[in-house]
Image: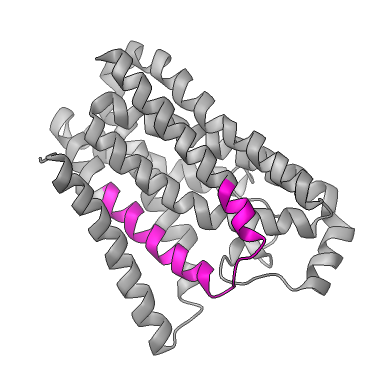
Amino acid sequence: MMTSTLGWIVAASLAGGILSAGAAAFALNVRASWVPMLVSFAIGTLLGAAFLEVIPHAFEIGEAGQVAGAILAGIFAFFVMEKLLLWRHCHTEACEVHDPHAAPTVPAAQAHGQQHGSRAGTLIVVGDTVHNFIDGVLIAVAFLQSTELGIVTAIAIVAHEIPQEVGDFLILLHSGYSKLKALWVNVMSSCAMLVGGVVAYFALPAFRDLEPTLLGIVAASMIYVAVADLIPGLHRRPEIRATLSQVALIALGIGTIALVAALSGHSH
């Protein structure tokens, strides 16, 4: 049973890493109009996984106060982490990372690269590596509860990784990295997801009493990324056509999670 769980964790982490690296290659030919579509779908999967799967399961195995406290503490902690530039990679609000829908223009990007290339590149590499490691831990936490919960969590995490990696890769290019170097850095950073998953698999069983708290933190990470990072970007496109597209894709993301849960036979 435990061997099977480790296999799932390794497979999901590898898949997440490969898709993250693939998103970098995809970014070479990405159309600006595709990014908000990916972001909208990612929002739906994150919220669907958090509210339909992770939180209900956490309440099943732990006390309500414990889980609610973990979610609150997690959201606050992620806010602090973001302020410390661990999860996001620029020091001002006026950058491509804080607007995932805006593809950087070449002149602006070149100026950014000349002024901040080395610093921005280092921050992106460090931030992505930490982020991917944490994602691996979150995947492991979910799979240690059940295979179904792990699959749903992995889908949500990978879904939000793709639009983020597209933006990060573009910023690396415009910070002075060659395409090959930016792709190689992205691949190496993605390996941290596998490392995080395996480390968590061997370390977490010693902290069984903390499982409801850890699941609360998993849910907090999903909610925070969706609500604080991704949704504000959608409000920059208030026109009716864009709004309808956003609503439909968010609903599709939620529906995808619900469908995966139903097909897996996992119910609460």
Magenta stretch encompasses residue 40 = yes
Q: Is residue 11 left or right of residue 118?
A: left
- Give the answer, above or below, for where 102 lies relative to 84: below
Tell me residue 64's x, y (percent): 17, 37
Q: Work out which residue is located at the far top of the displayed protein and give it.
A: 206
Q: Work out which residue is located at the far bottom of the displayed protein and give it.
A: 240
Which residue is nearer to you in this view: 26 or 216? Answer: 26
x 46%, y 38%: residue = 15
Quadrant where the N terminus is found in the figure: top left
x 51%, y 70%: residue = 34
Magenta span covers which residues?
A: 22-50
Secondary structure mainly formed by the magenta segment: helix
Tell me residue 211's x, y (percent): 28, 25
Q: Quadrant of residue 197?
A: top left
Q: Quadrant of residue 240?
A: bottom left
Q: Is residue 128 left or right of residue 50?
A: right
Tell me residue 190's x, y (percent): 58, 37
Q: Is residue 154 left or right of residue 65?
A: right
- Give the answer, above or below, for where 206 lies relative to 248: above
